[in-house]
Each structure stands twice: as C-alpha cells, then as structure tokens.
Image (spheres, rainbow, N blue to C red):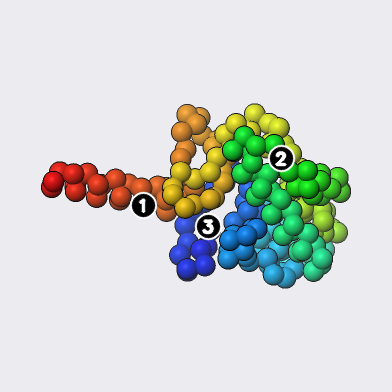
Amino acid sequence: MLRHPDGSSFRFDPGALCLELLPTGGPGALAYFEVLHEPADLVRWAGESRLPDGLGPGGGPGSGQGSALVVSAGEVADARLLRDALWRLAEDHVAGNPPGPDDLATLNEAAARPPLTARLTPGRDREWAPGGTGAALLSTVARDAVDLFTGAYAHRIRTCGAHGCRLLFVDTSRPGRRRWCSMERCGNRHKVRAHRARRTAADA
C-alpha cells in the first residue's frame, strides 16, 4: 500500500524490489515525498517491502530479536543516495538515455557490499540471519536493480501513463500492456476523464 502525503493511499506494485524504494522520496521535486528521515523509517520500509518477513524489530518466524535489521543514520543517508540514483537510472533507461556515470558508481558501490543472508529454520521457515545491516539491505536492493536492468524484463520498465505521475514499474503481466502505476488511482482517474469526455462530446 502506497501512502500519499495528502493522506490518500492506494495499491501499487512496481514489480521489483529496487523500484519499491523510489516512492520513499527522490531528487528535486520528488523530495516532497521524502519519508526516510531516521533509521526506523528504513527498517519500516524493509518490513513493508516485497522482501520476506523478518527484517523489522522482533525478526521473523523463529528468529527472535537477533534477526532484527540494524540501521545507522549514515546508512539512511546512503539509502537516499542510492534511491535518487535509481530514480535517474530508471528514468534514463525508459527514455533510452545512457546511464549517468555517478549514478552507476553509486549503484555498483552498493551492490559490491555483502547482501542480506537468508537461511532455513528447523520449522522450514525462511528467516534472515542475525546481523543484517542497512548496508546489506542496500546491497540487496542494488543487486536487484542490476538484475532488473540487465534481465528479461528490462524492456518492460515503464513510467505511469498518467499525466504528472512519475511512478515507475516493471510490467510483469503476460500481455505486457500495463499502463498505470495503479488502476485504483491513475487508471481509474483516466477512466473517469475518458467517460466525461465522451459525455461532453455526446452532449455537443
């Protein structure tokens, strides 16, 4: 569930972990949406992301307190830096522009660090190994971005078709015809506008 600063919320699935980080804020005018202010904010984002449960305080099934994600203030700043680079890299990718060298360096530096480590519990649940850090989380996100930009769905990274909406997603649907960040928000607004336009034309 994505929450807008105006208080509204709507379902939004960007189709990839790395793209889930983008709505937390961004460069330029996107700073209006900033929600990553302190370590708890990044921990909360991880717990609400498509990563398996167990990264929030208290850990996941059978993990105990030791599997909680520990994030420093410096790692929150790194998260914002990586997120802003991902915004530019993704928008350049959609536009067919070459990636910026500084943004590539930021992504690759994050990906070069050790990622989060998953393990199997005696109860056959998946949990995160103790000692997960913000740097490991960002490495996991960065590696996901590398996989996305070089993988089979790289050509399906898109910007929402609604005017004024910059949300990015990867279309993983079989027909590959997704246009909106969310049918609940931008898709529905488009339908309403189209309906009004048809009524106006009919009245004329």
Q: What is the x, y in percent for residue 147?
A: 72, 36
What residue did someone put label 3 on?
1
**Image: 75 above or below 186:** below
**Residue type at tag 3:** Met
> Tag 3: Cα neighbours inside 10 Å, few (<14), some, or many (≥20)?
few
Residue 12 numbered tag? none
Q: Residue furthest left?
A: 203
Q: What is the x, y in percent for residue 3?
A: 52, 62
Residue name at image x 58 percent, y 64 percent: 33
Q: What is the x, y in percent for residue 12?
A: 52, 51
Q: Earlier in the sequence, mark 2 or mark 1?
A: 2
Residue closest to the eye, 57 or 61: 57
Residue name at image x 53 percent, y 50 percent: 166
What residue did someone put label 2 on?
99
Residue name at image x 47 percent, y 38 percent: 178
What residue did someone put label 1 on?
189
Residue closest to the eye, 97 or 44: 97
Front position among marks 1 and 3: 1
